[in-house]
Amino acid sequence: MKYLCQVWLDETVMQALSDAERRELDRQSLAYDLALAERGHLVMASPLTAPETALTLSVRQGNVLTTDGPFTESREHLGGFLLIEARDLSEVTEIVARVPIARYGSIEIRALCDIPVHDAEPA
């Protein structure tokens, strides 16, 4: 089963890290990602750009509406993600508990849903 693990960060916590602490966190994160990939658990992982670089899009009555920045204002922002393959919630929890960035933020774990195949609607 695949799980999306969203990394939520408080930017003030991350800004308080020294350059050496950030480099070490990056080193630990990349090493853990490599270990997970070698064990067949990591499908993909990536940090995200800062929230102020976001573009929020919606479509209402055929009109595309965009807003610069994130959808909500909050202290925490989505800082990155991991897509993990695990047999169940227990296993993914054990895996994510060792993700280095979890010491500085929180990680929301959600299973991916299977989309049922529906027959085409008659014309």
Image (spheres, rainbow, N blue to C red):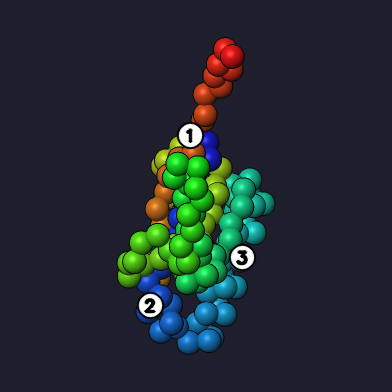
Q: Which mark is residue 85?
A: none
Residue under circle 1? Answer: 113
Q: CA distance from mark 3 to mark 2?
A: 22 Å
Q: Front-most of 74 and 59?
A: 59
Residue under circle 2? Answer: 13
Q: Are marks 3 and 2 in contact (CB under 8 Å)?
A: no
Q: Which badge, 3 or 2, comes first in the chain's sequence?
A: 2
Q: Amino acid at mark 1?
A: Cys
Which label sits in the foreground, 1 or 2? 1
The picture quadrant where one finds residue 9 is bottom left
Tell me if 24 is positioned left or right of 74 in this view.
right
The picture quadrant where one finds residue 85 is top right
Residue under circle 3? Answer: 31
Q: Secondary structure at mark 3?
A: helix
Q: Secondary structure at mark 2?
A: helix
Tell me if mark 1 has few (under 14), some (14-19) or many (20+) residues whose alpha carbon lies within 10 angstroms of its own: few
Q: Which badge, 1 or 3, comes first in the chain's sequence?
A: 3
Q: CA distance from mark 1 to mark 3?
A: 29 Å
- State the residue at coordinates (34%, 66%): 73
- State the residue at coordinates (52%, 24%): 116
Q: Front-most of 103 and 73?
A: 73
Tell me if 43 is positioned left or right of 50 in this view.
right
Q: Which residue sits furthest left?
A: 74
Q: Are marks 1 and 2 in contact (CB under 8 Å)?
A: no
- State the residue at coordinates (46%, 62%): 67
Q: Which residue sits furthest right?
A: 38
Q: Front-most of 90 and 19?
A: 19
Q: Amino acid at mark 2?
A: Val
Q: CA distance from mark 1 to mark 2?
A: 33 Å
